[in-house]
Amino acid sequence: MKEIPSAPEILVVYGDFHGFTPEELFDHWVTPDLLTQWWPSAAEIDPREGGTYAFSWPEQEWHLRGTFGAFERGKHLRFSWTWDHEPSVEQPLWVDLYFMPIDNGTRLSIVHGRYTTSEGDQGARQGNLEGWIHFGMRLAGLRLGEAEQ
């Protein structure tokens, strides 16, 4: 995963996931058994536009919740992003995932925002950048591990 330079209000990252079709990669974002292999400890998902999700990390007492605003398998996934342990924000952040086929895989682009220019929001933006890079590598490693077995 790499950052694409962008305005402070949004975060844009992308990465190439070899060995995943766009549909398979999409499924790793919306199928609890696949999702918990690389990101949250537990996941509850109503997989459809207008559906909701709830992710949790019990060891940290963290909970991430949201609603799917777009749900096009293998093409586009959009969801709101609200942490239970963070103070209320005026409007939730949104995450857009775009899946594009490439030779032997899929390019995933993530657009996360809308951040303000406040120090707190910019700190959150940096934390989200580091998180997407870390967890993107974990997701990519699932297929690499399969190929080595």
Image (cartoon, rainbow, N blue to C red):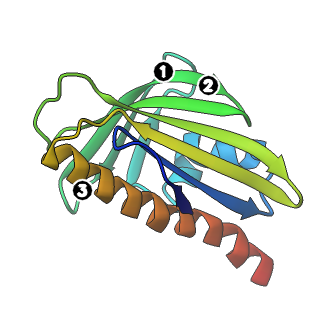
Q: Which amino acid lies under the numbered mark 2 shown in the image of this protein?
A: Phe
Q: Position of residue 28 (x, y in %)?
A: 62, 49
Identity of the residue furthest to the right in this view: 103
Q: Position of residue 60 (x, y in %)?
A: 19, 60
| Distance between the alpha carbons at the discs numbered 2 and 1 | 9 Å
Does residue 131 appear in this view?
A: yes
- Label 1's element? loop
Q: Position of residue 71 (x, y in %)?
A: 61, 25
Give the residue at mark 1: 51
| Distance between the alpha carbons at the discs numbered 1 and 3 | 23 Å
- Label 2's element? strand
In the drawing, what numbered circle is on residue 58? 3
Do the CB atoms of the residues marked 2 and 1 lie less than 8 Å apart?
yes
Give the residue at mark 2: 71
Give residue 30's quadrant in the image.
top right
Q: Which amino acid lies under the numbered mark 3 shown in the image of this protein?
A: Pro
